[in-house]
Image (cartoon, rainbow, N blue to C red):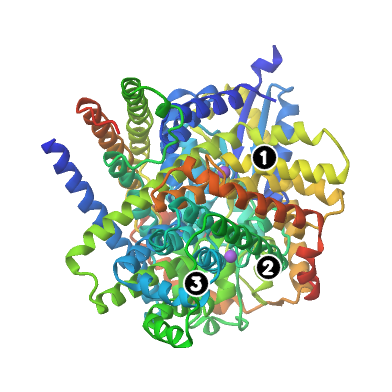
Amino acid sequence: NTLQDKKVIKLAHGLDMSHPVHKAMVFMAQDLEKRSNGTMAVEIYPNQQLGTERQALELLQIGSLDMTKVSAAVMENFSPNMKVFGLPFLFRDRAHIFNVLDGDIGKELLDGGQKYWLKGLGYYDSGSRSFYTKEKPVESPEDLKGLKIRVMESITAMNMVNSLGGSPTPISWGELYTSLQQGVVDGAENNPPSFYLSRHYEVCKFYSLDEHTSVPDVLIMGTHLWNDLNEQQQKWVQTSVDLSVAHQRELWAKAEQEALDAVKKAGVQVINPDKSKFQKKVANMYEGYKDENEIYNLINRIQKVE
Amino acid sequence: MEYIPVIILVLSFVSLLLIGVPVAWSIAISSLLTMMVSIPTLPALTTVSQRIGTGLDSFALLAIPFFVLSGQLMNKGGIAHRLIAFAKTLVGALPGGLALINVISAMLMGAIAGSAMASASAMGSILGPEMEKEGYSKEFGAAVNITSSTIGLVIPPSNVLIVYSLASGGVSIAALFLAGYIPGILTGLFLMIVASFWAKKKKYKVGKRSSIKDVVKTFIAAFPSLMLLVVVIGGIVTGIFTATEASAIAVLYTLVLAFWYKEITVKSLPQIFLDSCGTTAIVMLLIGASMSMSWIMSYENIPQDISTLLLGISDNPIVVLLIINLLLLFVGIFMDMTPAVLIFTPIFLPIITKLGMDPVQFGIVMVLNLCIGLCTPPVGSVLFVGVGIANTTIEKVVKPLLPLFVSMIIALFLVTYFPELSLWLPRLFDL
Amino acid sequence: MEIRKKIDKILGSTLAFIMAVMVINVLWQVFTRFIVGTPSSFTDELARYLMIWVGVLGAAYISGKRMHVAIDLIPRKLSEAKQAKLKIFVNILIIIFCLAALVIGGFRLVYITYVLEQYSPALQIPLALVYLVIPISGLLIIFYKISDILNKQLF
Ligand code: NA
Ligand code: NA
């Protein structure tokens, strides 16, 4: 009887199983199963088995998948206010990020997705993205001049690289390794674990920790399922997610350190450039949002958070 | 293990095929029926649509229409003819000379473009008609083209090996790339030997030995066409364009050359474009439909369940490796390569490392194995491309395919049980 | 038959046109990156969406031309009359699938992406427009198959 009543939640994502975010989701699944006395379970499909991040979001809306994890950068095409996270140097430091995500603004943005049938449950830490290059180190924005930098398919990311003087080039993540190797692009940008796990450090020997953006990952449930759960079940899910979010921050910090150590050991020169030079170059991007009231308000509110 | 989804999938698929439903629709309909077991009807219907649509949402797939198009332009524009005339003066006196040319050029093409489908579409549309003119059967030409195109996935650069590296949590891509050379070339040699024997048995025409004068004369005539290879390969290697973009450059180059030779007119262009669309669409529909099938197989955990079932049989290393290979060969019949790599790598990697096998070697074994799956009927993207472009049918290609398969399987087992074949080269470079 | 010819013609020119745009688009991508030095931001996305259109709309085109890859082992062993009946049955199966998955499922996909205001990342075009090709193609295939059955053009 219990087996039939069991609510099995299908969760698909694009990362491999050694990734800290995957581990956090496994933690969440185990906690939920225990918390619900075995009446609820989460089945996880890693590695893009059920599609890319944007396809998974569509499957949530379609109703054939229950949960997914996507970058806020992908989420912004579904829930536009999320694009605020793509702004460079929005946060002062790690504490500032967590205060924003854990506070009212974070919660508001998670709930905002419901209008699009996507209920945000929590943010996983995705660190900060920095430039890595093939030929020469990036010590200041001047070094980016004329370099073709691979960016995500996002207007904000392209504007940022443009403002810094580089040439933003959208190339799919899967084609990036060979594109770097053959010189179609001169560099790319990502957080340390991705730089390490994608093996791009085999080709790019310079990593400049300018930490320009901090785009979190978002854990999302389709409203199809969320509205179908009773209050008790919703509470269980939210609690398990919250616990896994806290756990993931520890896992992430560890993974980030391990990744940096590993790439250094592989001969990558890790540079700590003067961030203020980069910050100055992109300051004008903020003014570009003056016409977009909602985003502009969000920016101001985020800056006021302690 | 849940048996109902597997039974529905296999039963419906086989019966649809047998009563003559086109392969693409058989794949799509059986996937939909399987989805309806555990997903409510309306979402299931929508998911099939989404899979077919987004299955084509890939920049790398563009290589197919573009190489088909440039192949058509080469045939109609007199470029292919000049190239083949030159190639014939070189190897025309060997049995199966054109088949050998096909194997070598498909391997090269696949190796550089890193896409077996691109290679099969390029070589199929350039060499296929010429081989037919020389008296080769369409089916034999298609079979040679299909099998040799997949070898390029083992020879670097290879996107599938990158996918394997990601799924394995970081096996060195540089090591994988180096490891692929010897197994890839070995398999290619096997294919050439088989093709040569087959051509001899069928008594395909063997040309006379050419004089040096003929070689030079045809070389000069083919020179502008040969430059296409220089432009495409040179452009990729020097990083001017990606392998996918190279296919568009090939269209431009062949277009200019065909106009220069005055063998096509502006008026004939729309029909050439439309013909390429037709060939492309046959393949694309099959790919889109296979995406639905791979998706529902993952969703129902079918590959994982079958693995658990079979791997419980024995813990003898030789037997386990045999089971893994047979399992992958079987899965390759129904599933496309990328999803198979993503699903099976995490399942098998812990097992094979426990047996003491190097993950680099296993990557090559797995990709070589799934290469065979790409050409096995009824579901295989390269098979679809090869058959579609040769304008023949799957069941007619099976006969000439068989001996080529056998040689690939022999190569696979050599690579599985002799680690040096893959590991010698990376070790030489300390990787 | 008149209507069918007209549809063939429109479909054919649309496909040839999309194919031409695809080639120009990718050449433009190489040109802007390598010659101009400021890589275009939309060509990659446009190429992928045109690919979806060529593939899905092309499926209708090849259905009209009966150009599918099939395995005919059993049907060929039957008498001609039985073969014809079987072919009609196969066509009806295809019609049902296209109606259910491509037309109903496809339209629901268009509807969802439309009401949920989904736009593409680079070009900011509605995703509904991209997916619209699926129900259109479904309707065209149904049209071709019904016309095949009615005109007894089964082989
Ligand atoms: Na290759
Ligand atoms: Na196959």
Corner quadrant of residue B150: bottom right
Chain letter of mark 1 equals: A
Q: Residue at x 41, y 35 (%)?
A: B22
Image side of residue B346 versus residue A118, left or right: right
- Judged from this view, the residue extending furthest toward the left is C2
| A252 shown above or below C128 | below
Chain letter of mark 2 equals: B
Between the C-alphas of marks 3 and 2, the distance is: 27 Å
Circle 3 crowding by C-alpha within 10 Å: few under 14, some 14–19, many from 20: many
**Which amino acid, by three-letter code, is at mark 3?**
Gly
Residue at which label 1 appears: A242
Residue at which label 3 appears: B92
* Nearest to the observer: residue C16 or residue A11: C16
Discs 3 and 2 lie in a common subunit? yes
Residue at which label 2 appears: B181
Discs 1 and 3 lie in a common subunit? no
> Mark 3 or mark 2: which comes first in sequence?
3
* Nearest to the observer: residue A235 or residue A78: A78
Camera-side mark, 1 or 3:
3
Image side of residue B226 versus residue A239, left or right: left
SS assignment at label 2: helix
Q: Number of callouts in the render?
A: 3
**Which amino acid, by three-letter code, is at mark 2?**
Tyr
Residue B396 drawn at (x, y percent): 47, 43
Discs 2 and 1 lie in a common subunit? no
